[in-house]
Image: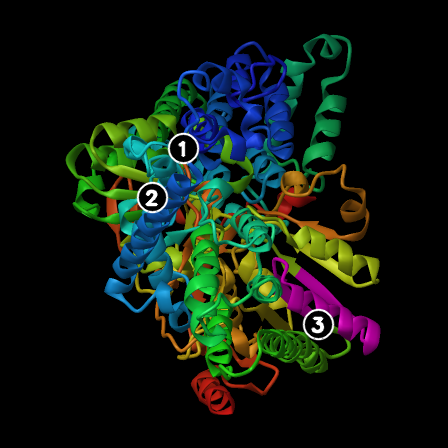
Amino acid sequence: MSTATSDPPAEAKPKNPEKPQTTPANAAAPANAESAAPLAAPKLSGAELKAKAKAEKQARRAQAKASKDATTGGAPAPASTGQSGHPAAESKGNKAKGKQDGALPANLGVTGRATGARGSVPTIPPKPENPIPECFGHLSMAKRLPITQADKDVHPTVLTLGQQMATFAIDESITRLKATLLAFKKVIDSYTTPPGNTLARHLTPHVLNPQIEYLSACRPMCFSMGNAIRWLKLQVSKIDPDVPDIDAKKQLCASIDAFIQERINFADVVITQKTADYIQNGDVILVYGRNTLVQRTLLHARLVDRKKFDVIIIDDPYERQGQVLAKTLTAEGIKVSYSGDFGALQYQVKLADRIILGAEGMFSNGALYGRCGTSDLAIAAKDFGKQVYALCETINITERVSTDSLTYNEIDPERCSSSSFRLLYDTTPSHYLSTVVTEISSAQPTSVSYLLRKLEDSN
Amino acid sequence: MATQKGGYTPSLEKFLDSLKSRPVQASVELLISLLKRRQIKGSEACATATAHILLQVVARDKWTNVDQLLGRIQLIGRKLVAAQPHELATGNIVRRVLGLIRDEASEERNDATTDSPRPASPSLPAVSHASSPSKPARPPLLPSIGGSFARTQSMFNLLSDPNVILSTGSNASTPGQVSGASTPILNPQATNVSSLRSEVIDGIQEIMDEIKMVDEQVQTYADIFIHPGDYILVYQPSRTVQKFLTRAASKRKFTVFLVVDPSTTATSEGQYASLLKSMASNGSSVITVLNAGLMAYMSRVDKVILGARAITAQGGVVVDSGAAAIARAARERRRTVIVLGGVYKLSSESKLLSESQIEWGDPSKYVSFADGSLVSQVRVKNAVSEFLPADQVDTYITNLGAHAQENLHTIIADHYKEEDINFDLYGKAQR
């Protein structure tokens, strides 16, 4: 971060003498300009400038290309991210290489423009402050990529979104997906196909990919984002080259809207209703932390279905989002009992009739990818023969398989130092879940792979 | 508590300091209130305090025969246990002392008189069915209470009829036991009281030494159980567990997942500073884990080490709240769960111990009292300790070594007398 803040002035120094007429904004650094400007004659002609700019652009392209090759080398990952937008492999790419790659083109772009000799500026600035324990080295972590380090092609909306994701202001998988799609809509909206290109061929590699790379550099993509981006790329590639730009863009935006409506909004409504039906009068429902879908379900059961039931909230002591849920529920007249940690977990589970869990994702083997602690809860529930419902939109289902919690996971960037470490997710094996409720069906967790296939067929 | 330098906060140290300057009965009452207010907490502190107070009782109370002393100890024991029924170590120490007195007494009798089994046998039924009305050995209790009252209220005593005090004392603490017949064993034993007293005092001091030595002794088994390259998960490690790790770190390089109490994250570094330091200096690494659900880590963890608050004869363990979930997760992945604790934590008590035995504590741990909407509407629960069933523990390490679950019975038999095991410390004291 420190280098990021120091860059602009340093850059301004040499730049001013070169082309003072084109950079009125740089008058903000008057001291530099005064000292430098009289010396170096601003004699670069327009043609020279142009040539220079061109050379730089080419260099940048080469850089970007090289980086892309590097990342694609291992897996067909970020370049064709659609296939594998997801925490682990992706983020690994972004973590080890992606970080440098992501930073390099931007950095070089800036510094190269300045003198070219300044290429030795530390290009990997914030690496050492996060000592990830060796045994978790394969896991990925969100990081606050300074906006200045982002690729210049990244759309402002996406820039903001990336920051919001990196700071966990937008956290839940489905919310992130929705925000991403809306942002991409804006990106597409502001896009014009350069002459000599077709939208279907140009949009994805030159416009969408930088956005995707930036987003996943900010925080590893969740399964749903990977799925949706793959879908989006497919839509782009399907566009007829003969269709005029405006129509193509309209078509794309319309299908994004439809996608959001169908796979997120309606899905949520359907899941909420279905799960609320499972709740009986007089039930005690146990939930973990705060999940939007679970909260909506409880409110739906209370306000729409007029059911009377009690809720036990077990919370993650490091997030305490359950308190927010507790307030929301008590405001609607639901009796709530709250536990701040996993103390007396078995006892609490024994009191409950049903356990409702929100899923961050589902693996095709039926395992649930959820907030860390979910699996402890599910195990306790199984011990006492309680019904465990996992709520998940189908867009969150991935074709990948995970058998333990360390295959795919994320490290909490806020709590990753020499004195603290925290995993954000865990994986609950399928046999601890009774029912997976999706907008298509509520079924055994093992039927998830079938669901997935069905969805692929329908696409 | 102990870290507060305020000067007025009661703590174990202050209590122990004040013992000598205070009358015995006053110390007993003070300890009871300290236990009730949880100002002395933790099994080691409770055990130490109990041993000290019993030492005072033995040393400074007036008692003229063994049964009188036993009765007195039982009475105080019940009160202490009632003050903090979740802390089994208190009862354990009481039972240990009772057994000790019995041992010493029977030795004395063997030396002094020929009819040694006779006085011991009548006390048996009296103790084991504490509620039965026929108690030949019970009456001597009365003078002892009167005695302690006489000591504490000696000024009042000057002008009053000793019988009145005697009866009020007995009514207050042990009503319905005024059967009043004197016992024949009183006289022959009177001569031995002073030697018995010193023997018992020595014995109690041994118990106190044992409590102090537990950490040292337990840690000698560290390098047997911790292997190079292991990943060890510890949950809010007690001093015993910390020393265990430290010792192992001096011989092996391994990794510790240190799970801290979420509410003390800020202070945890100070709390575990010496552990972190010694681990680091020996090349082992500590990862402080800030997660509540630890299933995610279990595929990496090799062994889970938990500190016990108490261990039952059946192998169940009273642990810090949250540890049961961890042990369950470890079981899920078939990881070894090791429980550490001194023999003094090993309890014959099984009455209160079911899976639902949970000590609930201060709810403000996670929910601030300033948060009105939560405080007034939501039922906030915070468990302090919970019960870990025997089937989720693989092995127990005490100061005597590592034990299998099946061995615990024999250790209990070695340390407690049967009549004391059967003695109900709970029921009567809760009046």
* Disc nearest the viewer among 2 and 3: 2
Give the distance between the C-alpha atoms of the residues marked 2 and 3, in whole angstroms: 37 Å
Give the distance between the C-alpha atoms of the residues marked 1 and 2, in whole angstroms: 49 Å
Q: Which residue is mark 3?
A: A297
Crowdedness near tag 2: few (<14), some (14–19) or many (≥20) residues, C-alpha within 10 Å: many
Crowdedness near tag 3: few (<14), some (14–19) or many (≥20) residues, C-alpha within 10 Å: many
Given residues B262 and B397, the one toward you in this image is B262
Residue A183 appearing in the image: yes
Crowdedness near tag 1: few (<14), some (14–19) or many (≥20) residues, C-alpha within 10 Å: few
Given residues B29 and A438, the one toward you in this image is A438
Chain ID, mark 3: A
Q: What amino acid does circle 3 point to?
A: Thr
Task: Say which label, 2 or 3, has the lower sequence index.
Answer: 2
Residue A44: which numbered mark, if any? Answer: 1
What residue lies at 74% left-to-right and 38% top-to-bottom? B369
What's drawn in magenta, residue-wise?
A: A284-312
Q: Which residue is mark 2?
A: A132
* Disc nearest the viewer among 1 and 2: 1
Q: SS at mark 3?
A: helix
Q: What amino acid does circle 2 point to?
A: Ile
- Coloring applied to the structure: rainbow
